[in-house]
Image (cartoon, rainbow, N blue to C red):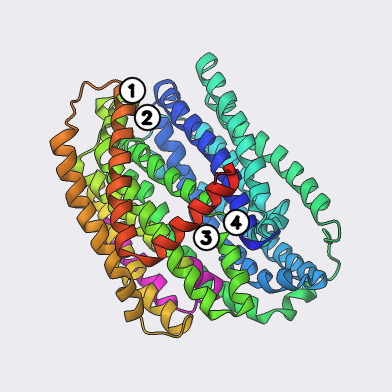
Amino acid sequence: MSRVSKSLKNAKVGVFFFTISIFIQFFSRKFFLDELGDDFIGLESTLRSILGFLNLTELGIGTAIGFTLYKPLYTNNQKEINKIIALLGVLYKKIGIAILVIGIIISLFFPIIFSNTQFSLFLIYFVFYTLMCSTLLAYFVNYHASLFGADQKGYIIQKYFQSFHIIRVFLQIIVVIYYKNYYLYIILELLFSIIYSIILRKKIRQIYPWLIINYKKKTSVIQEYPEIIKKIKQVFFHKISEFVKGGTDNLLIYGLINLQSVALFGNYFLVFSKLNSLIMMAFAGTGSAVGNLIAENDKKNVNKVFWELVSIQFFIAGFFSLTLYYTLDHLILLWLGEKYVLSKIILILFIVNFFMTQITATINRFKNAYGLYSDIWAAISEALINLVVSFTLGSLYGISGIVAGTVGSLFIIGVLWKPYYLFKYGFEKSVFVYWKGLTPILISFALSCLLVNFCIDLFLSTNNDMSFINWFFYSCKVSLLIIFIYGTLLYIFNKSFRIFWTRIKTLLKTTFKLN
């Protein structure tokens, strides 16, 4: 199967399952908030954020290992692959033990951290340790799954993971409606994680029968790969930065405001995080495909693929950003109620953060494929800017100030620094090539914002008494308008987008056998 075919299969399977999962999660969110309460959902989100902090001890091992696997997979060097996976197992088991120990230590302070909550300490400990056990399975049981991702078979993981997720959420809804039991609600997560781990392990044995699950020389294999250890140390700081950007907001909101605000923030965060994840599913396999492409050392093709991905990612970022601006408040109002609708400035900050995340995704994809992690100072700076600005502005302006800190740090490091670093040390070109190529795309988006706003004000006026059906048709009209205006302008101003559109037309003709 070709690199493009694998990427398409990853995308199709990932988007299909994830779309179903998103609808179910949005459907279930209303039940969980109504039946379990804002405070419990806020508590669960806070505990998950603490576990996210503990996962920093993973040190970016998976990322570094994935980068190292590209070449032996390309050359089908099974002996080398076995050694690298064995190294992953050694490191992951050590990290799993570290997470367990640190988690126990942090939990000793729960009586102080959660002194103002209405929930018993027993429940808090039960939720935390159940979620932690579920997390640890990835380190002790199914760490071999990293091979699927590097080998462009991520669709296998998604197929099983999302299927189990969907079934689990349905059972949790039943438990919540009929029993309103916090313990049963949480224990289902651990139960399904165990079943998922067992099945995934069997699938690994089936697809890679030559893979040595229990490698005998595990300790000595560490000494054979000093380059991987070096990469792991570098990626660690980037992982810290990623956690601070996406994992500390819940903790800051709880610390500076309250648990209920964590739940309010969580509704918007759910929308944007799931949308980000859905887009990642659509691009599933492209990271490993880019890694394999770079391994071939065809610079002309690398440059061509880079600009195509940039144009596609910009179109996706612009389309969803504009659509969400005009439709999300109405959805929150219909979905959860008026008290869950946050201010317009918070919505705009969420959208800006989403937009920048998307337009920098291609930069990150190529940066990772080249193994460029030595800009440790950038990762530390991004984390510090985020924390300082979020804490300062959060103390003054609440949720909007906390999100502003995330936006500011992403702009300085993600938008301004990372392209320079990739072009200098990866492509070995001037970063002005990037900004020159980006200029027509940025002009297309700016013009689209003005034209879309003008057309919506003139032709698509709306009101707050909208029903779900009216919202659906309104959203369709807005989406089609944005696609027409933004897509047309990008097609006119950007050559790479025209190439992408030609590929889409060819694919549609082939798929549906059109003349």
**Which residue corresponds to the image point at 45% horizontal and 85% vertical from the top-left?**
428
Q: Pick whichever of labels 4 and 1 is earlier in the sequence.
A: 4
**Could you tell me which secondary element the residue under label 3 belongs to?**
helix
Looking at marks 2 and 1 on the same chain, the residue that comes earlier in the sequence is marked by 2
Asked if the residue under mark 4 is in contact with the one under mark 3, i.e. CB atoms within 8 Å, the reply is no
Q: Mark 2 belongs to which amino acid?
A: Asp
Q: Nearer the viewer, residue 447 or 200?
A: 447
Q: Is the magenta stretch mostly helix, strand or loop?
A: helix
Q: Kindly identify the amino acid type of the residue bearing the numbered disc 1.
A: Phe
Q: Which residue is tagged 2? A: 38
As drawn, the residue found furthest toward the top would be 178
Quickly name the residue at label 1. Answer: 468
Residue 146 screen position, x and y as percent: 67, 58
Q: Where in the figure is residue 305, as x and y percent of width and height?
A: 50, 68
Q: Which SS class for mark 4?
A: helix
**Which segment did they paint magenta?**
365-392
As measured in the structure, the alpha-carbon distance from the residue carrying label 2 to the one carrying label 4 is 40 Å
Could you tell which of marks 3 and 4 lies nearer the N-terminus?
4
Q: Nearer the viewer, mark 3 or mark 4?
A: 4
Determine the secondary structure under disc 1. Answer: helix
